[in-house]
Amino acid sequence: MTLPQLEIQLVAVVVAVACALPGVFLILRRMAMMSDAISHAILPGIVVGFFITESLGSPLLIVAAALTGLLTVALVELVERTKLVKEDAAIGIVFPVLFSLGVILIARYAGDVHLDTDVVLLGELAFAPFDRFTAFGLDLGPRALWVMGAALGLNALFLALFYKELKLATFDAGLAATLGFMPGALHYALMSLVSLTAVSAFDAVGSILVVALMVGPPATAYLLTDRLAVMVGLSAGTGALGAIGGYWLAHALDASIAGAMATMTGVLFGAAVLFAPERGVVARWRRRRRQTWRFAEQMLAIHLLQHENTPEAERECRVGHLQEHLGWAASFAERVVHRAARHGTIERQNGRLRLTDPGRTVAEDALERT
Amino acid sequence: MIDLLHELLFNYTLRTVALGAATLGIVGGGLGTYAVLRGQSLLGDAISHAALPGIALAFLLTGSKEPIVLMLGAAGAGVVATLVILGVTEATRVKYDSALALMLAVFFGLGLVLLTYIQRHAGASQAGLDAFLFGQAAALVERDVITMAALGGAALLAMALGWKEFKLLAFDRDFGASLGFPMRSLDVVLTTLLVVAIVIGLQTVGVVLMSAVIIAPAAAARQWTDRLGVMVGLAAAFGAVSGVSGAVASASISNLPTGPTIVLVMGGVVTLSLLGAPNRGLLWQAWRDRRNARRLRRETVLLDLYALAVKHDRLDHAHEESVLDAMNAWTDRTHRALRQLAADGLVAEAADRHWRLTDAGATRAHQLAEERHLVPPPASEAEPPPAD
């Protein structure tokens, strides 16, 4: 691995973690689509900021663009509050209009500035190592690393300082308001962080992929845990994993790194959907199957218990009779009996089924519970 | 103006672009109506972003840049994304908004990987695929427009054929199910039609902005009417007008990209509708509020005057305006209310700044007081208590 490769991966990981932190609260507050709206709508802010500062890395540009993000949030709320348009439609109108404004500004003045819509929308992480941050003649590493490091630090600091407030406002906004925690102010603070992070990240990964990094890892973590603190940690870890995996995927295909990071984020989410320990599709399927068998074994034990030592026992306690009495298919009945015998709850004696002592306990326990 | 018309009719490029923009506006507006009414506005956004890998994959597999091939690829990816979003929402506890945002970005990322892969491996033959990002209306040729019109026309026809069923789906799904309509299949069909509407616009407007073409005309049309049929027609008309004017504007002004211009025009139409639509519009609302406030002020002043008259046992007793001022909060407007009441013949100025009720005013005030249960009906008119 060469130094630029290492640097690219480092930037990718820092971007992913910086995005994952506010993302956790976005998805818990059901505002995931705001990340989409903000990341598109910052374009005119970036363009105007670029006209003024003539540098994509200027802090002034970042602030100007982040303000556009907040403007988007405010505009969506303004339109929504008229009650003439639903929230989703309000989002879906406001951000394309702002984005269009940005594209037109770029197109009109493309001759004068070095700024390309593709760059803003798609980003190019591969160029990150070439743009160095130097101070006092010293090379201090890629500029993107510093910008994103600052965003990550800010997000982490905010999270650490307002963790309790965020948690309360997210899960019980009403109580938070009653206790005087100002959920409204917290909402705007969170939106500011989302804007700031999206602006900082756009020249590395592009504005649309910011959405993948903000929503993907937290959604994955959401499937793995019920604890907020664990979810934050898992999101950061998933984000980092997706970033590194994405880098190598892009390396193998010789394709866009940002696109590959988003794809890997999707792959990790898909893996969580399938294989999450408790909520995964596979885990749920296995649990259901296990329950089917256990229930069938209990039924068998209860059936045998009912007919134990009765005159009909000879007729009732046979595998073939289970089809008639419990409505089981022959093969299923055979398999249940086989499993029950293996677990030692019943015994076979010349075709007759007999409860063992543990089997009797199983049946009695099951009956007692109902 | 004449020049513009001449250009529209006889300039091949402009005519093609304008027709294409009109087509996508009509189809997007018409079918977008259902998306907006059903709360699926952002699904349109997700579908349009998700179309990108479909376009790239279609090109990778066939090597063809035929519009119909790319549109089919885009539609396939759009349908897959929709199904994945619905599947994730149903099978896991991940919420709809997260699923939308995630699939939108992941599919787009995959599309980007495929596009860059094609770029670096297939050389120059990929030229033109980038157009799908932001759209490239100027590159539209007649065959593109014919494909768009054929697909869009088919989608609109399907919408018309299932009109009653789709209406049920949009407004009362459970009722439709209870009548025995296959609501789930209808849902799939209508969403597929939405995918078609999105796909035919991608080449002109691009994946990023296409959602606005679906949402904006419908959201604007909603303000003008409460009837589905009218709303679909209006949305299609708004879409067409925005499409054509955006296309014309971008053709006449240099460096004005078509897609974003169309979206800006649509944003303007939405703003105008939100402000100016009769009944629902904000200006209309403000005017109605003002009118109501004035009427309430007039009635209150009239009632105050009546109350004073009743206290003095003389309905034509004149009272000082300052007294009336003191009786309510909007002191500076009492005079205006009195002048309006005088114009209606309900009060008269007995002396300078002294007002009395006229006969008509007394009758009206009494009526108002009764309506608001401020006075018990006079004993003589009240019905005697029923005898047991």
Image: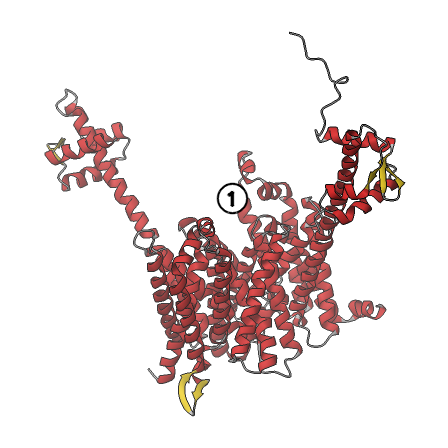
Q: Please tell me which residue lies in front, B183 or B329.
A: B329
Q: Residue A281 location in percent, x, y?
A: 35, 51
Q: Quadrant of residue B126?
A: bottom right
Q: Quadrant of residue B146?
A: bottom right
Residue B250: tell me if it is visible.
yes
Q: Residue B360 location in percent, x, y?
A: 86, 32
Q: Amino acid at mark 1?
A: Arg
Residue A119: tell me if it is visible.
no
Give the residue drawn at x 34%, y 62%.
A234
Q: Residue B74 location in percent, x, y?
A: 54, 62
Please identify the quadrant where the C terminus of chain B is shown: top right
Give the residue drawn at x 55%, y 77%.
A61
Q: Please tell me which residue lies in front, A97 or A301.
A: A97
Q: Secondary structure at mark 1?
A: helix
Q: Please tell me which residue lies in front, B107 or A230.
A: A230
Outermost residue to the bottom: A137
Q: Quadrant of residue B385?
A: top right
* Dot 1 alpha-carbon crowd within 10 angstroms: few under 14, some 14 to 19, many 20 or more: few
Give the residue drawn at x 51%, y 70%.
A207
Residue with the mark numbered 1: B184
Q: Is residue A144 left or right of residue A330?
A: right
Q: How many marks?
A: 1
